[in-house]
């Protein structure tokens, strides 16, 4: 099982040798591709070839390329690896409207419940109680937009700003960590032959990852908790400007190893991502919402 998260932040030349990724900088390091879960390229002077990109995809490495602000902007995904990719894609195209709405309802119930647990953990008891009531009243397709109402209550309590525009440091840190988890989910979606553009609720014509952005929703509170408990503590007393330091980014790389719960057992987020996508596929193949499992925050 792959476990390394590798970040390249200085100019480097990448090559292959015996199924190992060779990183040549001042010194040379060779890492087995089978050990690499995620590769984050955060320097514009990193040189890699099409051959390396192909190898990374073959080994299901979650490869993210960052922009000039050090935020992940590009995901490299495997293509056509699933044994029944055509069947899975056809099934996804044929999801019935009732199942689509029930899948979204279950997704939002878990997201709001996880948000309530985050608020409870940080002693925002009244807001957590309001969210639990909202979670209990989500209807098919979330037609009343309980998700939006919950988000305003949640971020207003947690960050003091429901718009998430302030404080800026938190916004940058959350977006960075969300992008890493998004890449992990995208890898699992693509490796099963599912269509990333075809969501169950998100449907933007400009978004290549509508399904991924559906499935990440219940993960977001787990990411929020990680940022607050593991990363933000180093900024206590700061003015929280929008810049992430190198230390911040190194801490955020490890978000995939944050734990959550599914079916009463602890798993890391990178494992949960695979399990959620697998359960989504089971649900659409069986035309039932029952197999669809989602992560929960560890209370």
Image (cartoon, rainbow, N blue to C red):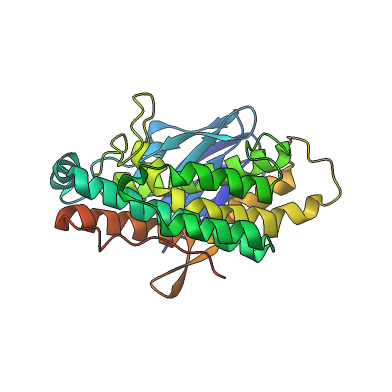
Q: In this view, does 205 lie to the left or right of 181?
A: left
- Placement of 167 over or under 88, stated as above or below: above
Q: Can residue 32 be seen in this view?
A: no
Q: Residue furthest right?
A: 237
Q: Residue furthest bottom?
A: 264
Q: Is residue 281 left or right of residue 7?
A: left
Q: Is residue 199 visible?
A: yes
Q: Which residue is drawn at 60% across and 52% down?
A: 224
Q: Where is residue 13 in the image (x, y as percent from the top left)?
A: 55, 36
Q: Is residue 13 left or right of residue 74?
A: right
* Nearest the eye: 228 or 244: 228
Q: Which residue is drawn at 60% across and 28% down?
A: 45
In which quarter of the view is residue 164 placed? top right
Q: Where is residue 114 in the image (x, y as percent from the top left)?
A: 51, 59
Q: Where is residue 127 in the image (x, y as percent from the top left)?
A: 62, 56
* Nearest the eye: 66 or 33: 66
The quadrant of the picture occupied by the C terminus is bottom right
């Amino acid at each position: 099982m792959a476990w390394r998260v590798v970040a390249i932040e200085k100019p480097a030349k990448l090559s292959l040798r015996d199924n190992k990724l060779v990183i040549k900088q001042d010194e040379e390091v060779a890492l087995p591709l089978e050990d690499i879960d995620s590769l984050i390229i955060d320097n514009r002077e990193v040189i890699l070839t099409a051959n390396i990109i192909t190898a990374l995809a073959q080994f299901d490495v979650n490869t993210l390329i960052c922009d000039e602000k050090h935020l992940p902007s590009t995901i490299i995904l495997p293509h056509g690896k699933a044994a029944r990719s055509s069947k899975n894609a056809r099934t996804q195209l044929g999801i019935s409207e009732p199942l689509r709405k029930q899948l979204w309802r279950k997704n939002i119930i878990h997201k709001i419940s996880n948000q309530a647990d985050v608020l409870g953990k940080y002693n925002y008891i009244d807001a957590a109680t309001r969210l639990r009531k909202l979670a209990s009243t989500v209807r098919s397709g979330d037609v009343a937009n309980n998700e939006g109402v919950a988000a305003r209550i949640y971020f207003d309590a947690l960050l003091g700003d429901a718009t998430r525009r302030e404080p800026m440091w938190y916004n940058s840190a959350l977006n960075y960590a969300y992008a890493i988890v998004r890449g992990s989910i995208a890898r699992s979606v693509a490796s099963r032959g599912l269509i990333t553009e075809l969501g169950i609720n998100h449907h933007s014509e400009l978004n290549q990852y509508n399904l991924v952005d559906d499935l990440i929703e219940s993960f977001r509170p787990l990411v929020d908790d990680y940022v607050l408990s593991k990363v933000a503590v180093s900024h206590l007393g700061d003015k929280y400007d929008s810049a992430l330091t190198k230390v911040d980014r190194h801490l955020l790389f490890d978000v995939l190893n944050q734990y959550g719960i599914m079916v009463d057992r602890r798993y890391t987020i990178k494992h949960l991502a695979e399990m959620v996508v697998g359960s989504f596929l089971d649900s659409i193949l069986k035309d039932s919402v029952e197999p669809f499992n989602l992560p929960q925050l560890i209370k």
